[in-house]
Image: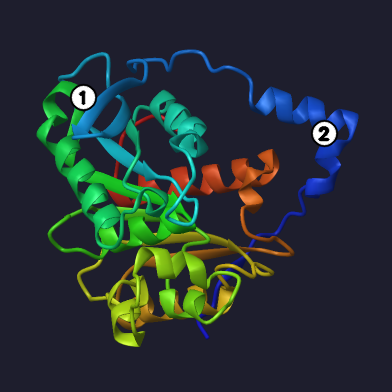
Amino acid sequence: MVDYEVHPTTPPEMAELATAPGIAYSLEFLAPMAPPAGATELRRSEYQPGLDLWAHGRLDPSERRPGVLFVHGGGWGAGSPCYHLRHAHQLAQRGWVTAIITCRLTASGATWPAPGEDVRAAIGWLRANAHGLGLDPGRLAVAGGSAGGHLSAMAALDPDAGVQAAVLWYPAVDLRSFAQVPEFAPMTDALLPGADHDALLAASPVGNVHAGAPPMLTFTGDVDPVTTLDDIAGFHEQLTDHGVRNELLVFKGRDHGFDFHPADWQACFDRMCAFLTSVLETSAPG
């Protein structure tokens, strides 16, 4: 088993959000956000027919800043780009170009590899529009949680996508594990109908690790029954074995989606900023 870092603090439990102070804390966290300094407002574009991308570019498009593309989770069949709205906004305040996207979902009949193709198409759109956004196309990361973590990891592991880093929250790294759990098997059945062991592995990050992969940072909880620590630690062990820079931060006592709590969200965000700054060598203020 790969060594990993355990998050040292103990933030408030999710149940505390039901208290009056907890509600006030959450409302403050979810309050409307002022326009990012130095950045454009989120602007909507259709990066391919029927699929939308919302981007924060730079007010001065002659800048060449690093960028992050966020891919939402939701079991490949649901979810919303709004999951990553605050990530995109606060990174834009720090001088980054950011984008969040929709992609084809199983709820609408999409199957693999359609959502993976959509992520790569969005990466291509960002690079094609780099000069208007103030983006450095050679400093682009992908990020996402759960199913979005699976799609982000697969994009990062695709040499043709050519991204420079990935940040993952409790990613689905081994679809074979999902297929073996009755509660979760319908998700993989919808994504890859009738897939056997080999097909599930080929569509999983654990089946695509290679020595040329970019640095990856993963956040997860140690009691997550959906995307288990064993699976994620095994993925990081493969990254280490292939000489890929990687960091795994485990939150003690945390379940799937733990970062929806504002305190855990902030801890992940701060670490993400440090990691991306280190990997992409940006001069953006932190």
Name the side, left or right, on which 180 lies relative to 88.
Answer: right
How many angstroms separate mark 1 from mark 2 (CA)? 38 Å
Q: In x, y percent, where is residue 257?
A: 61, 53
Res 12 visible: no
Of the numbered discs in the image, which one, if any, rests on residue 133? Answer: 1
Q: Residue furthest right?
A: 19
Of the numbered discs in the image, which one, if any, rests on residue 235? Answer: none
Q: In x, y percent, where is residue 122?
A: 22, 41
Residue type highlighted by circle 1? Leu
Judged from the image, the secondary structure of the residue bearing numbered disc 2 is helix
Residue bearing the label numbered 2 = 22
Question: In the picture, which quadrant includes the C terminus?
Answer: top left
- In contact (CB < 8 Å): disc 1 and disc 2: no
Judge whether 285 appears above or below 199 on screen: above
Between 121 and 63, the residue placed more toward the observer is: 121
Q: In x, y percent, where is residue 221?
A: 64, 63
* Comes first in the chain, label 1 or label 2: 2
Name the side, left or right, on which 266 lies relative to 18.
Answer: left
Judge whether 139 appears above or below 257 on screen: above
Residue type highlighted by circle 2? Gly
- Which residue is pictured at 85% across the width and 42% down the height? 16
Between 80 and 150, the residue placed more toward the observer is: 80
Query: Neighbour class for label 2 at 10 Å: few (<14), some, many (≥20)?
Result: some
The part of the image, by quadrant, that contains residue 42 is top left
Counting the numbered discs, the total is: 2
Res 241 visible: yes
Q: What color scheme is it? A: rainbow
- Which residue is pictured at 15% across the width and 43% down the height? 124
